[in-house]
Amino acid sequence: MRRALPIVLSLLSLPVFAQSQDRPAITGVAFIRVYTTDPAAAQTFYGHTLGYNRIEAGDAWVYTVNRLQWVEVLQHTPPPDPNSRLAAIGFTTRDTAALERYLKAHDVAIVQPLHDGEFSVRDPEGHLIYFVQSVAPKGTAKLVAAAPPSLNAASHRIIHVGFVVRDKDKENAFYRTLLGFKPYWFGGQKDGQLDYMSQQVPEGTDWLEYMLHSNPNPTLQTNGGQNHFSLGVADIHSVLGQLERNGCADDACRNIHPGRDGKIQLNLFDPDHTRAEFMEFKPVLKPCCSPFTGPPPGPEESR
């Protein structure tokens, strides 16, 4: 599902900072879109175990996390890659029209032109990336903003999304140089090893995590662990209690542990192996490998 992005080579030689006066604010994660081959089981996972309300938006089931963030599940569309269920990731911006013009001016091809407050492009490794209007939202974002909050959700905040990256320098030319994302943290499964590279959105605290050193012959399970979204909480024990009330009796629903970044987390997987990671907003242990270079996220953030 990853195709080369028709970005001119001059992108790689742009200055090491984005022209913020020309680029509208990019403020956070809007959504993650995934495929499922088992809609009933997906509803059990997202609607019952995680506790989110579902609304209909075309061919997608939309699970509302808060008034600005959601998870989309494509239940009628066959996944184009049998070993991946990631379909798209969206970020919020205060001015989609101006951001679309900005990207066009830098020779980035528009996949879906601006419609209902959103448009999409592909990054250098072919990930489908949407930008969604956060001010006076339209389309799916408007439906989400009007939806009542779920009383059973184990978290009301997406704090980051992550996906497989093969060439961090090409991705950095797009996300950091062109779009202005800021270095946040990097680390590895072992000291001295680089497996994770995080960069915060330029005008917010949400972040994008590169999952490096991936298996050259990935399976659905390995890709599902890498292509993920993270749900933020102040105290992971509140998640344990809510998951229990939502009927999750599996050992996975109690398996909390510190990550390499010093934050306590818990990992669950949907029926198609996409990982949903619960993570505390702030570290409780010293992070390995590098310090955090930006502020931590919190329960709510102005967009």
Image (cartoon, grey):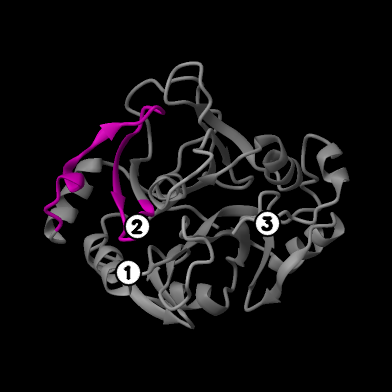
51 left or right of 62? Answer: left
Mark 1 neighbour density, 10 Å: few (under 14) some (14–19) many (20 or more): some
- Rendered location of residue 114, percent (x, y): 70, 74
| Cα gap from disc 2 to disc 3, whole angstroms | 33 Å
Q: Does the magenta-highlighted stretch encompass residue 263?
A: yes
Q: Earlier in the sequence, mark 1 or mark 2?
A: 1
Q: In this picture, is 200 found above or below 86?
A: above
Disc 3 residue type (three-letter):
Arg
| Cα gap from disc 1 to disc 2, whole angstroms | 9 Å
Quadrant placement of the N terminus: bottom right
Disc 2 residue type (three-letter):
His
Q: Does the magenta-highlighted stretch encompass residue 205?
A: no
Q: In this picture, is 110 found above or below 170?
A: below
Is label 2 or label 3 in front?
3
Viewer can see residue 194? yes
- Rendered location of residue 187, percent (x, y): 49, 26
User: Mark 1 and 2 residues: CB-CB less than 8 Å, in contact?
Assistant: yes
Disc 1 residue type (three-letter):
Pro
Q: Residue at x 53, y 25 (%)?
A: 194
- Rendered location of residue 207, percent (x, y): 53, 44
Magenta region? 248-275
58 left or right of 250? Answer: right
Q: Residue under label 1, please give it.
A: 149
